[in-house]
Image (spheres, coloured by chain):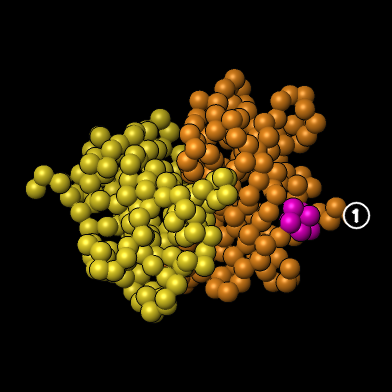
Chain colours: A yellow, B orange
């Protein structure tokens, strides 16, 4: 991945805090908003959702999801040229004391400290969003598909180190 | 629908210019970004897409889609409380001289005048996004599901008039 495009993807994922989550709902796509944080090691994303919400039931029934992160709109950028990334992924519910749960909780709370009270609610749980394929569009004619390993490198955590 | 919530939904759809489009892609949800305009009469949305794009092939194969529109992030609003609307809908390709095509094109170009050159490209076409059900979340504990008729009223085009 070209360094400029990699920097743009990293900046997008590090600065944006909400994503559009696509789940399979009764055989149809369904898109809802989710706040997200980055998992340690650049291995994916973490979301905190209520089992009362449709998307949570959807993910438990069908873990294949799609996550879209879009750069903020700006008067200087035509909407068609906004940077965005679509991540095809598997959603995996964290069940305590599953490995990685504490790290995922810490990652989420360091981005959303005001959410700590929601961790006391029994209907909320964390899900890992584990990428299978990432499609990044950095602007007009700047698109690239990368692997999960490529994403980890972009986020600065080379798995080989 | 409470007047305050209706005003908030109308403002969201009239001021936002991009949406997250969920399509069914090889049996999985897939979410991509689309600029959108409102169809005349409050009857739905219109998008302009290339048949080279995955979402276009998806819509032709499986017209059931989901559209998510989110209010801009603001330092004053926790991400969980951002206003957003999920629209479960059918995507229908406009084929000239199908009824409504000229109006849809006009609606799109009045929101995106710089897109006029893209109408000269043979791979681009307009799709109507016809709502079946709208779920609006106006903030914490402010959610409402409305019908397409309810949406038309919210947008100020009462079908009975």
What residue is shown at x 56% (from left), y 70% (from top)?
B139
Write the start and end of the magenta stretch as one range.
B147-153
Drawn side of residue B118 relative to residue A63, left or right = right
Magenta span: helix, strand or loop, mainly?
A: helix
What residue is shown at x 40% (from left), y 30% (from top)?
A141
Name the residue nearer the viewer: A100 or A12.
Answer: A100
Q: Quadrant of the N terminus of chain A?
A: top left
Note whether residue A62 is visible: yes
Name the residue nearer the viewer: B99 or A60.
Answer: A60
- The image shows residue B21 at horizontal and vertical percentages of 54, 44
- The image shows residue B32 at horizontal and vertical percentages of 49, 42
- The image shows residue B38 at horizontal and vertical percentages of 69, 46
Note whether residue B117 is visible: no
What residue is shown at x 37% (from left), y 75% (from top)?
A119
- The image shows residue A29 at horizontal and vertical percentages of 55, 46
As drawn, the residue found furthest toward the right would be B161
Q: From the viewer's perspective, is residue B74 above or below residue A13?
A: below
Q: From the viewer's perspective, is residue B101 above or below residue B28?
A: above
**Quadrant of res B115:** top right
Drawn side of residue B75 relative to residue A45, left or right = right
**Quadrant of res B101:** top right
As drawn, the residue found furthest toward the front would be A61
Badge 1: how crowded within 10 Å, few (<14), some, or many (20+)? few
* Chain assignment, label 1: B
Q: From the viewer's perspective, is residue B138 above or below residue B111?
A: below
Q: Which residue is mark 1?
A: B161
What residue is shown at x 49% (from left), y 49% (from top)?
A22
Name the residue nearer the viewer: A21 or A113.
Answer: A21
As drawn, the residue found furthest toward the left would be A161
**Quadrant of res A38:** bottom left
Label 1 sits on a secondary structure element that is loop
Q: How many numbered circles does the render carry? A: 1
């Amino acid at each position: 991945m070209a360094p400029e495009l990699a920097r743009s993807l990293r900046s997008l994922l590090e600065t944006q805090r909400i994503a559009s989550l696509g789940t399979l709902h009764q055989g149809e796509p369904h898109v809802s908003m989710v706040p997200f944080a980055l998992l340690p090691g650049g291995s994916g994303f973490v979301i905190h959702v209520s089992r009362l919400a449709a998307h949570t039931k959807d993910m438990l029934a069908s873990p294949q999801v799609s996550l879209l992160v879009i750069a903020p709109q700006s008067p200087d950028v035509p909407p068609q040229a906004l940077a965005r990334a679509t991540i095809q992924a598997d959603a995996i519910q964290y069940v305590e004391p599953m490995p990685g749960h504490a790290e995922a909780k810490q990652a989420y709370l360091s981005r959303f400290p005001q959410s700590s009270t929601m961790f006391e609610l029994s209907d909320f749980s964390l899900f890992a969003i584990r990428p299978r394929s990432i499609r990044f569009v950095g602007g007009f004619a700047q698109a690239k598909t990368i692997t999960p390993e490529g994403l980890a490198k972009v986020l600065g955590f080379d798995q080989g180190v």
